[in-house]
Image (cartoon, rainbow, N blue to C red):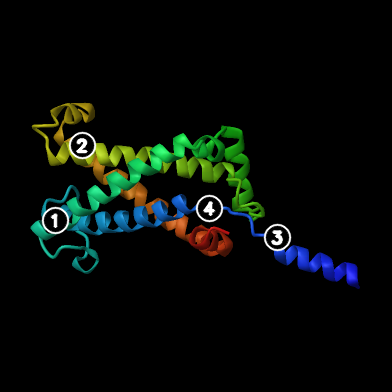
Amino acid sequence: MSSLTVTDEQVRATPAKVIQPAWVRIMHWINALAMILMILSGWQIYNASPLFDFRFPRDITLGGWLAGGLLWHFAAMWLLMINGLAYLVTGFATGRFRKKLLPITPSGVLHDVRAALTFKLGHDDLTVYNYVQRLLYAGIIVVGVLIVLSGLAMWKPVQLYYLVMLFGDYPTARYVHFFCMAAICAFLVVHVALALLVPKSLRAMIIGR
């Protein structure tokens, strides 16, 4: 009994493994806030000159009118750009992206997609991303870069004409910006759903362990 008691005490004394370091958690929640503000204000801006035959309900937009939406959008833009750039630099400098997101192989993605669809995808070790997570997280980084570049092209089409030319023309930049926004919204839905299905991953993003 004494040996069992010692073992229990040792287990309790062992610090929990850090899954998400502090810098990741802080930047993650700042990015989440900035993205939500940009999406809601972006919908307000879109409603002023829609690309398609629909508008977003006023109740889920931010800013009240075009000028208000623009003010919110630009404020959140700087927050997202600065925090996002810091996240990218830190992720590459620390080797986190290489360790967490690579390699990504078609066979690995197909295997994990099948496992996820049959509810056999394991989540025992949160320090290791499965291939579906790697693809989603790497993809959303690329989408994030595209939406920033297309947004800048729309904001200053004359001064940043080379960004407009990168997308072909101004209307194309608008379409790229819209579809990148749609991709981010889809990612957020999947991301939140997975967090709810695996609550310990949400706990790790809040307290790190």
Residue 35 in the image, given as x and y percentages of width and height? 31, 54
Q: Which three-letter amino acid code belongs to the residue tagged 4?
A: Gln
Looking at the picture, how far across and down is residue 91, in whole percent? 45, 40
The answer to which of marks 2 and 4 sits earlier in the sequence is 4
Number of marks drawn: 4
Q: Label 3, label 2: how many angstroms apart (C-alpha)? A: 53 Å
Q: Establish if 169 lies above or below 121.
A: above
Residue marked by disc 2: 173
Q: Could you classify mark 3 by the number of other residues whose Cα lies within 10 Å: few (under 14), some (14-19), or many (20 or more)?
A: few
For mark 2, does the 10 Å Cα neighbourhood hold few (<14), some (14 to 19), or many (20 or more) residues? many
User: Residue 39 lies in what quarter of the image?
Assistant: bottom left
Residue picked out by circle 3: 14
Residue 104 in the image, given as x and y percentages of width and height: 55, 34
Name the quadrant containing residue 81: top left
Amino acid tagged 1: Leu
Three-letter code for the amino acid on which mark 2 is drawn: Ala
Residue 71 - label: 1
Q: Are marks 3 and 4 in contact (CB under 8 Å)?
A: no
Q: Sequence-wise, which precedes: disc 2 or disc 1?
A: 1
On-image quarter of the C terminus: bottom right
Residue 190: image location, x then y, percent: 46, 55
**Marks 3 and 4: which is nearer the front?**
3
Relative horizontal placement of residue 49, taking residue 196 as reference (left or right) = left
Tell me the residue at 45%/35% (across/down). 92
Asked if residue 167 lies left or right of residue 32, the reply is left
